[in-house]
Amino acid sequence: MNLPLFIARRINGSEGQRQEVSRPAIRIATIGVAIGLSVMIITVSVVFGFKHTIRDKVVGFGSHIQVENYMSQQISQPAPIAISDSLMTAMKSFPGVRHVERYSLTQGILKTDDDFLGVVFKGVGNDYDATFLSEHIVEGEMPKFTNGQSSYPLLISRMMANKLRLKAGQRVFAYFIGDNDVRARKFTVKGIYETHMSQFDQSLCFTDYNVPIRLNGWEADECSGAEVLVDDFDELDSIAEQFVQHVNHRTDKYGRFITSQTIREAHPHIFSWLELLDINVWIILVLMICVAGFTMVSGLLIIILERTQMIGILKALGMRNKTVRHTFLWFATFIIGRGILLGDIIGLGIVILQQQTGLIHLDPASYYVDTVPMELNIPIIVLLNVVTLLVSLFVLIAPSFLISHIHPARSMRYE
């Protein structure tokens, strides 16, 4: 039989016999652990949700890896590249690659009777992975993009629609300035999307794959590049290394150099900003663990002082200091356990409530999202529970040595 555990259970179960001093101390310690853990769960859920939401939006516009003309990274104008079918097949065969598709870009001006707006037209084909854009359609429908003859469909953002006073189903003229002429095309607004990523929403619209190619005067086998989606974002760097080794520095049929870049390299400012959030998380986790630890230390000291007579009796019966310390550490474990359970209920409850209702709102102009995104990560939450328990017990080891200074004769002198 584990004697310290047995005695701790009896102490923990004697609710009615607890003195008035220890009862509030135990409650404060329990609440301190609960608050600390619930704040940690909410913080981690918000940061994971925010980082993954913003990351997925950036990837939705630019894929994980872009294969393009080397000059595209040096100049602001779209530069063509000829990506052969054999290269497409080779890229699709790389381990970890989920999808590869060609795309084309051109610049133009959308004009209505009242206003005009310079935008980038991105041409995508019937092999385009439209999952991301479909989730953010707010008006109209997702166009059925094609690689062949175009009917000039157009998918624009809510920002563009508000500025130009356009709605789904309306037609709008677009003007494209070439070297010696200006070309006009009439597009039909099939749908309107909204992602709250202002740097994309204010400038990027989507149409059929061949439209930018014809307007740029490119050959049929030329495009702006290829977009690559991977299975696991955490493996992006290792997959990108395969492209560096097998794709970069190749030349197309016209002698132009092919290069690749990851989404991190294309938008370093966004990903650097997201990485800064990790510092805030560590600060909050350390502070909350300190809160839980300090409340448990104060609670244990009060309980030990209140149970001085009981400690004296146990020592008089022959129990060693180590065994008595273990008894109170087991008792503290029960208190921490109740605090952890309460913290899990509060933290998980708030996270699930926000996921289901979007109760807490944000300014999308500043945060790129209109509600606080929260993501449940069960392994991380389990780790937080274990760390909270272990750290709380660890900081109690030193205060528990107060028991060795309690003498049986002195402690039992007064009733």
Image (tube, grey):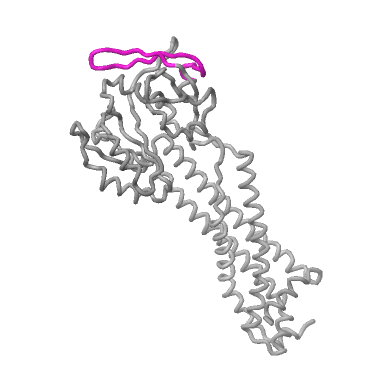
In the image: residue 305, left or right of residue 92: right
Which residue is at the far right?
16
Segment tinted magenta in the rendering = 162-187
Does 176 lie within the magenta span? yes
Q: Quadrant of residue 225?
A: top left
Quadrant of the snapshot with the N terminus: bottom right
Residue 340 seen in the figure: yes
Name the residue located 27 percent from the left edge and 46 percent from the top edge.
Answer: 244
Does 182 lie within the magenta span? yes
Viewer-closest of 158 and 327: 158
How many discs appear?
A: 0
Provide residue 255's location: percent of width, then percent of height. 18, 34
Which residue is at the far top?
113
Provide residue 139's location: percent of width, then percent of height. 54, 24
In the image: residue 232, left or right of residue 139: left
Provide residue 151's location: percent of width, then percent of height. 42, 17
Viewer-closest of 179 and 373: 179
Name the residue located 52 percent from the left edge and 36 percent from the top edge.
Answer: 369
